[in-house]
Amino acid sequence: MKYLKLTLLLLSLCTISACLYKPNIQQGNVLDQKEVNKLRPGMTKEQVRFVLGNPVLNTNLENDTWYYLYYLIPARGDKVEKRLTLTFVNDQLTTMEGTIKPEASEE
């Protein structure tokens, strides 16, 4: 009887401890402010791709609009969401919109 109680107690502790782990959930392109600061109007699509990588969402219908999205749902803390929409005209970067944008340089 003692072994049965001990076994049930250990099994219960293992089950409870397994429920405590919650992983971070991360999706999309990691948008680092240093990398975004490198963007300038007039850059080509290839130059933007070199700096930020491929967009997470790029449709054939809107080939001149690129969407960079990043979501992080941490195990603890607040959700992080960053969006950057780039628009090209004649293969040249013209507009940048979203929650993260290039900061003005202090040069």
Image: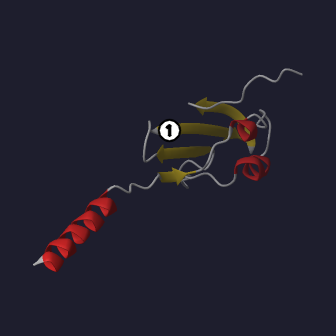
23 or 14, which lies in front? 14
Question: Label 1 amino acid?
Answer: Glu
User: Vertical placement of 104 versus 45: above or below?
Assistant: above
In what element is the residue under mark 1?
A: strand
- Residue at image position (26%, 60%) is 16
- Foreground: 41 or 76? 76
Mark 1, Cα crowd under 10 Å, few <14 / some 14-19 / many 20+, is some
In the image, 38: left or right of 16?
right
**Way the structure is coloured:** secondary structure
Q: Measured from the top left, where is residue 6 in percent x and y?
A: 20, 72
Residue 26 versus residue 16 in the image, above or below: above
On the rendered image, what quadrant is the N terminus found in? Answer: bottom left
Task: Tell me the residue that label 1 is attached to.
Answer: 81
Q: Residue furthest left?
A: 1
Report the residue that reaches farthest toward the right.
107
Q: Residue at x 54, y 45 (%)?
A: 70
Where residue 74 sits in the image (x, y, percent)?
A: 46, 46
